[in-house]
Amino acid sequence: MDIGHNDINGVLHLPYDQMLAKLPPVVAEIKKAIETLHKNGARKFWIHGTGALGCMPQKLAMPRDDDSGLDENGCVASINNVCKKFNALLSEALDDLRLQLTKATIVFVDMFAIKYDLVANHAKYGIEKPLMTCCGHGGPPYNYDPKTSCMTSDMDLCKLGEKFISWDGVHFTDAANGIVASKVLSGEYSVPRIKLASLVKTAKSDD
């Protein structure tokens, strides 16, 4: 399950304390959904936390008075703090479910750590423009214009997508997604430390 991002996006216009107040009901619904799936026979759950939404060009290009709200890597600190709070609540809910659903395997994947690392240590991955879109409009620092989508004739398309994290301000480039996928599959960011492959049954070939 990769869920919750749009719920967080839907409250980002609110004051910070109100944003935080909206998170517990969202997590409660996710917990309820897992319980429902379990009642219907599901026993293996692979749950992704939300990523670092405050590092998305779409969020960075939103009007602000100054840069005091940006963290050391240029991301919107308040938005990322909301994401981290959501992930903490989700992780706690999954801990409760492990005690409740003792025969189920419930894995939480720290997507925030994975995706924030791409920004904080972008050079290690060969990324040169961690906060700019590959397909956007407006040029530096974010090359993002909410009035000009990637599908319009006004867009500017980068030549080397592997040098960017963001494709269109919201979605990742194929290169960035590949890095994220490898980290997810590694099991290093999973609680408990389990690889996805160990939860998947594969049919044995007769050859």
Image (cartoon, rainbow, N blue to C red):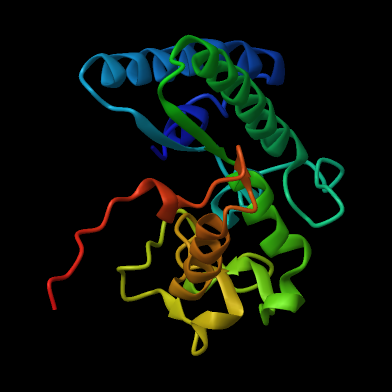
Among all residues in the image, which is located at the extreme bottom? Answer: 159
- On-image quarter of the C terminus: bottom left
Left or right relative to 32: residue 179? right
Q: Where does the image place residue 88, in percent across and percent down from the top left? A: 67, 25
Q: Is residue 19 above or below residue 63?
A: above
Q: How many marks?
A: 0
Residue 164's quadrant in the figure? bottom right
Q: Is residue 151 above or below residue 20?
A: below
Q: Where does the image place residue 32, in percent across and percent down from the top left? A: 37, 12
Q: Is residue 128 above or below residue 111?
A: below
Identify the residue at image location x=43%, y=15%: 101
Residue 138 appears in view: no
Between residue 15 and residue 167, name the one nearer to us. 167
Identify the residue at image location x=28%, y=51%: 201
- On-image quarter of the N terminus: top left
Between residue 150 and residue 183, name the one nearer to us. 183
Among all residues in the image, which is located at the extreme left? Answer: 206
Between residue 134 and residue 2, name the one nearer to us. 2
Left or right relative to 57: residue 1? left
Left or right relative to 174: residue 182? right
Q: Where does the image place residue 26, in percent across and percent down from the top left? A: 47, 17
